[in-house]
Image: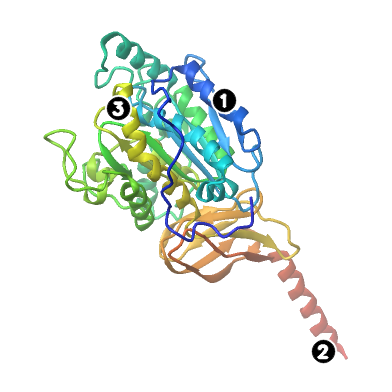
């Protein structure tokens, strides 16, 4: 992580040399996908690391590439970001544009493009082009045979399960906790009995991945419409209507960052995907207001970890022919970069004790927002917030809580708000010493 001032100006549009006129646009099967990652790693070995957090039902690796200035290491204070594509195997636009974004970041970094250099040097980026390689293989087979793909063929995984309905229904558990007047508002857990269904292999991989890295911001790339979808994805009564989460203002800002940087997503005059499509103001929608999705990955990120995730619907045609892919890249390129930059909004800092030792799992609470986050293993935290003044409290069992005012400016640079907590035992011992001295004084 370089000590530079981040993103104080709007995203600049550059004339790029990649992909050039000689680039062959094609759909990438499993081998071709891995080849893109490996070739990028060879071209940019100092800023990349290729790894697999796990395998699919058919034992295919969910290959991921990390792009940052110090790959393989979490740098204290540096936020972590992820893109996940192809959760539904036949929704391929996200997969393909991520396979362009990966070498694009490498090449632009090597060229010294300021926006990309600053982003890569100050963010740990993880990109998983496909979460459902088994479903994709089914969809690709149909596409190669017929020249098109049916609406649902290849959508599910190899066990014919929709992965975006397979996560624990954290919303349901949260609504239950609210009804019980519980103060639990983050890092919600559920027993297998509460979950009520078998978690697929891919789902388990993602859940483990979520907790292995301190992700701050994420997007899940889908297809079938053109809109940025944000939490909550489920409603209390299961019916379609707006269901706010505690960070509604932040999610609206995040969603608009993508939709307004996209070529057409926020355009009210764009051609609709079908005759029944409703209009999406600013190209964004609350998930539950559109249609409820219990057991979705988006809300699991928000309820189960510190990570804020939105779902991006990137096109009407889920599996377009390869010759249409250049337009999808052009439409999404600036939005993909802009959204990654949004990991740097809000406040960030460290929580330590008076000796300077870091405090992991300290709770960061913001007055007026009923959703807390916790510090990572280095005592660092990142709290996404819209511009304004906030009363922020850091607390941890065994320590006295501390509160301070933190101001968030309208920039893409988080405000530093550090906390030093005093151990309760130190305070207790101090009181004991004072009482002892008073007793000695009385005797004299």
Residue 309 at x, y percent in the picture = 42, 44
Find the distance from the CA under tag 3 to the CA under tag 2.
Answer: 89 Å
Image location of residue 187, percent across then percent down: 49, 46
Query: Marks 1 and 3, Cα distance to the nearest angstrom?
Result: 24 Å
Residue 181: image quadrant is: bottom left
Q: In screen coordinates, is 88 left or right of 342? A: left
In this image, 128 relative to 86: left or right? right
* Numbered disc 1: secondary structure: helix
For the point 63% across and 60% down, which residue is it?
Answer: 351
The alpha-carbon separation of the residues under discs 1 and 2 comes to 80 Å
> In the image, which is nearer the foreground, mark 1 or mark 2?
1
In this view, 286 is above or below 104 = below
Give the mark nearer the N terminus: 1 vs 2.
1
> Tag 3, which secondary structure?
helix
**Nearest the eye: 127 or 380:** 127
Q: How many marks?
A: 3
Q: Looking at the image, which residue sits at the far left?
A: 275
Instruction: Of the two numbered discs 3 and 2 on the same chain, state the one appearing first in sequence.
Output: 3
Residue drawn at x 35%, y 11% is: 141
Q: Which mark is residue 176?
A: none
Around disc 2, counting alpha carbons within 10 Å, would you say few (fewer than 14), some (14 to 19), or many (20 or more)? few
In the image, residue 95 lies at what x, y percent? 41, 28
Which of labels 3 and 2 is toward the front? 3
Q: Which residue is mark 1?
A: 39
Mark 3 = which residue? Answer: 324
Viewport quadrant of the C terminus? bottom right
Q: Is residue 52 visible?
A: no
In this view, 135 is above or below 407? above
In the rendered image, which residue does mark 2 sit on? Answer: 442
């Amino acid at each position: 992580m370089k000590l530079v001032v981040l993103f104080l100006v709007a995203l600049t549009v550059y004339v790029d040399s990649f992909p050039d006129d000689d680039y062959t646009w094609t759909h990438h099967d499993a081998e071709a996908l891995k080849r893109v990652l490996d070739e990028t790693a060879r071209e940019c070995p100092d800023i990349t690391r290729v790894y697999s957090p796990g395998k699919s039902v058919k034992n295919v690796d969910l290959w991921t590439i990390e792009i940052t200035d110090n790959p393989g290491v979490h740098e204290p204070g540096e936020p972590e970001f992820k893109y996940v594509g192809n959760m539904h195997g036949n929704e391929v636009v996200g997969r393909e544009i991520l396979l362009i974004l990966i070498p694009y970041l490498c090449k632009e970094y090597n060229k010294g493009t300021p926006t990309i250099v600053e982003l890569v040097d100050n963010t740990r980026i993880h990109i998983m082009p496909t979460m459902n390689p088994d479903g994709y293989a089914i969809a690709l087979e149909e596409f190669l045979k017929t020249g098109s793909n049916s609406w649902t063929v290849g959508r599910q995984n190899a066990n014919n399960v929709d992965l975006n309905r397979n996560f624990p229904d954290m919303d349901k558990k949260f609504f239950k906790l609210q009804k019980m007047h519980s103060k639990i508002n983050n890092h919600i857990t559920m027993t297998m009995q509460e979950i009520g269904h078998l978690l697929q292999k891919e789902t388990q991989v993602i859940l483990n991945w979520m907790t292995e890295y301190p992700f701050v911001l994420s997007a899940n790339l889908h297809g079938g419409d053109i809109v940025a979808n944000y939490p909550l994805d489920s409603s209390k009564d299961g019916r379609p209507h707006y269901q706010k989460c505690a960070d509604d203002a932040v999610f609206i800002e995040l969603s608009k960052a993508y939709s307004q940087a996209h070529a057409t997503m926020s355009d009210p005059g764009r051609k609709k995907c079908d005759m029944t499509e409703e209009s999406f103001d600013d190209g964004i929608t609350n998930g539950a207001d559109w249609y409820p999705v219990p057991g979705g990955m988006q809300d699991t990120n928000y309820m189960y970890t510190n990570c804020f995730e939105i779902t991006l619907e990137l096109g009407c045609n889920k599996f377009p022919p390869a010759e249409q892919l250049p337009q999808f890249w052009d439409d999404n390129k600036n939005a993909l970069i802009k959204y990654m930059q949004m990991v740097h909004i809000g406040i960030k800092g460290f929580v330590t004790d008076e000796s300077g030792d870091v405090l992991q799992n300290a709770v960061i609470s913001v007055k007026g927002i009923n959703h807390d986050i916790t510090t990572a293993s280095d005592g660092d935290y990142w709290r996404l917030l819209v511009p304004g003044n906030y009363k922020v409290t850091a607390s941890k069992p065994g320590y006295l809580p501390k509160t301070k005012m933190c101001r968030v400016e309208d920039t893409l640079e988080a405000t530093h708000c550090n906390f030093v907590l005093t151990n309760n035992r130190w305070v207790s011992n101090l009181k004991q010493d004072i009482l002892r001295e008073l007793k000695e004084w009385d005797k004299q």
